[in-house]
Amino acid sequence: MYSKLDLPNSAQLLLQLTPTRCVVTWTALISGSVQTGYFSSALLYFSKMRRENIKPNDFTFPCVFKASTALCLPLTGKQIHVIAFKLGQINDKFVGCSAFDMYSKTGLKIEAQRLFDETPLRNVAVWNAYISNAVLDGRPRKAIDTFIKFRRVGGEPDLITLCAFMNACADARYLDLGRQLHGFVIRSGFEGDVSVANGIIDFYGKCKEVELAEMVF
């Protein structure tokens, strides 16, 4: 509670007064620190947690990967990846996804690709991370190819997938492909979502289809 209320000193004091600290206690403190922007504190608490021989769980790792990403500390992220691997947590869909996101956003593209290729069970969150990071990295064609592969293996896109794919089409000015996606959005009943609608408007605007953009608006 204290950590989420941006009272890190109170949270730390409460932790020190707690006689039996467990993974839940430490993870709550780490998560609260990340949510309030105290990323260095989150990594420090993770280190202290490890020194007490408490094993992180599938909720702890995404938090510290996010902290490493925010501070742009790929080496720290790599070390956390090793710990997650040794504890058998890296194949968890949320842990693996957060590790991939960390590698992508800290510039370690080769490590990110290797982790993606080695992920045995890719859920929609993992695919979304790959597609979104490809768009952010200025590789819309890669994002589009990945979306097509995602659909071929039976993947069902969610709102995040659709927004990322539409952004890729907008950046690459792929009018025909974007129109196909617009049709898919209508058939799937997602046209009422504000984020998707904004993505479609932006897509048509970048493709200089002003009338279509106004129609969606």
Image (spheres, helix red, strand yellow):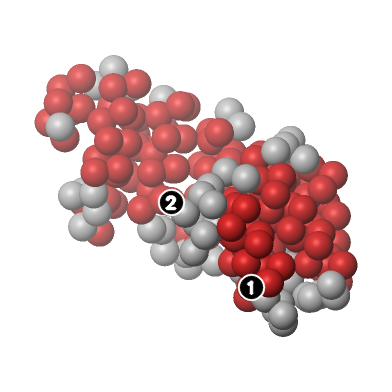
| Image quadrant containing the C terminus | top left
31 relative to 211 in the view: left or right: right
Tell me if residue 108 can be seen: yes
Which residue is situated farthest in the bottom direction here? 20
Q: Position of residue 2 (x, y in %)?
A: 52, 60
- The residue at 77%/40% (across/down) is 73
Q: Position of residue 112 (x, y in %)?
A: 73, 48
- The residue at 53%/43% (across/down) is 132
| Residue toward you, 163 or 155 | 163
Q: Amino acid at mark 1?
A: Thr
Which residue, given by chain and number where applicable, does mark 2 sit on? 161
> Where is residue 90, by image quadrant?
bottom right
Numbered disc 1: secondary structure: helix
Which residue, given by chain and number where applicable, does mark 1 sit on? 25
Tell me if residue 33 can be seen: no
Residue neighbourhood size for the residue with mark 2, other residues' Cα within 10 Å, grouped as few (<14), some (14–19), many (≥20): many
- The residue at 78%/75% (across/down) is 55
